[in-house]
Amino acid sequence: MIEKKGLNLLTELPKRFFDVKVEEVGELFSGPTLIHLKSDLKSKKSEKLPLFVSTLLHGNETTGFYALQRWLIDLKPDNLHRDIMIFIGNVNAATANLRRNESEPDFNRIWNQACLNKYLFARELHTYLKNNRPVASIDVHNTSGDNPTYSCVNRLDMSALDLAAEFSKIIVYFTQPDGVMTKMLSEISPAVTLESGRSQDWVHIDEVARYLSRCYEDVESLLVSKKVHESKVFHSLYRLEVHDSSDFMISSDARDDCSLVIRKDLESLNFQELDSGTIFGWLNGKSKLRNHLSVYNESREDVTDNVFEVKDGSIQLVRTLIPSMLTVSEPAIKLDCLGYLMERVELS
């Protein structure tokens, strides 16, 4: 049972680390694993605090793993000037190229206190990080839909915002969903999530590898760079969820053979400012929107009627908002959500 599975702890990279593909990680790791690479005590810079990096919380989001391979192969891990702690998350799902297995939880929803009490490996990692406090923490993800690369933070903390701005000039601040890893990490160190486009994109893999290298070399300077003032910061307000019981499909126009139709080009709207009246899809017949699609605010309150209305069968925004992570991937919609809606934040 995953609840009773402990954290594997390694002090060096497996011999075949640089040779395997993500679907082969099960040959290197038997489950959730922390690799703590120790610095060279003879190095003049060895007193720098550790850097923490996590990847494969979702098994089909592979950029972080390949970026680690690219970065570390040039770094020579036997001669480090700061400790590096690497968390390899959902090994079973990665082997199967799945976000998660049906029998397992979402590994990026288990980091609140209730779940830490439930999952042994998560609790052990949390304790380890508190005892070996990193200077900064980075969690690498991919998006299923068409999005630019961007960073996320869970606190409007200037050091985290500057760390985020080093990766992208687009930054999203969010507090929900609860239980994401960076919310836990942000209580220990400045923490960012990197949303690095779609998996298997080598341009973004190189982009993440270069970012990790800059953080390793001098993250202390990045944390006070003031780069956030060159960035656009958004506040994620609403999460769009299609009900498990809904019969929905993706199409370019309304259909008679299902209750909810999601517009086929929905992903093209990501990070665009949308006016009221923008159509997200169509509702068939006498169906009620609340029976198929719900909108939740940061307090997990259903605010569907404050965000959408149905006019002549079309589902329309009722106010100006900016979407992110909108997807037409049916597995992503069913396992996670349809996307998020945001507004711009002006920092003082």
Image (cartoon, rainbow, N blue to C red):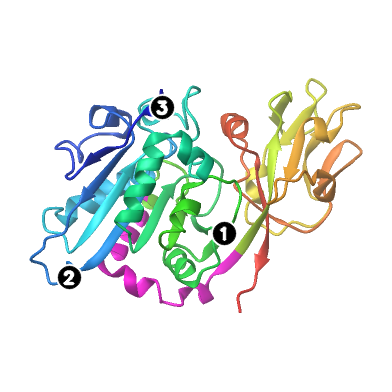
Above or below: residue 264 compared with residue 193:
above
Instruction: Identify residue for label 3.
Output: 2
CA–CA distance between discs 3 and 1? 31 Å
Residue 290 picture quarter = top right
Query: Quadrant location of the C terminus?
Result: bottom right
Between tags 3 and 2, which lies in front? 3
Query: Which is nearer the eye, 327 or 268?
Result: 327
Dot 1 corresponds to which residue? 172
| Three-letter residue code for mark 3 | Ile
Mark before the other along the chain sequence, 1 or 2: 2
Quarter of the figure that contains the N terminus: top left
136 vs 102: above or below: below
Could you tell me how far apart the alpha carbons at marks 3 and 2 are, in whole angstroms? 39 Å
155 relative to 205, above or below: below
Residue 213 shown in magenta: yes
Residue depicted at x 74% and y 25%: 246
Q: Nearer the viewer, residue 284 or 298?
A: 298
Residue 277 falls left or right of residue 130: right
Mark nearer the N terminus (3 vs 2): 3
Asked if residue 184 lies left or right of residue 86, the reply is right
Front label number (3 vs 1)? 3
Q: Which residues are magenta?
A: 205-233
Residue 107 in view, yes or no = no
SS class of the residue under badge 3? Answer: helix
* Viewer-proximal residue among 273 and 77: 77
User: Callout 3: 10 Å neighbours few (<14), some, many (20+)?
Assistant: some
Of the numbered discs 3 and 1, the one sitting upstream in the chain is: 3
The structure residue drawn at horizontal position 81% and vertical position 56%, both measured from the top left corner, is 319
Residue 50 point in image, percent of width and height: 27, 60
Using the rendered view, name the quadrant where residue 280 is placed: top right
Residue that mark 2 sits on: 45
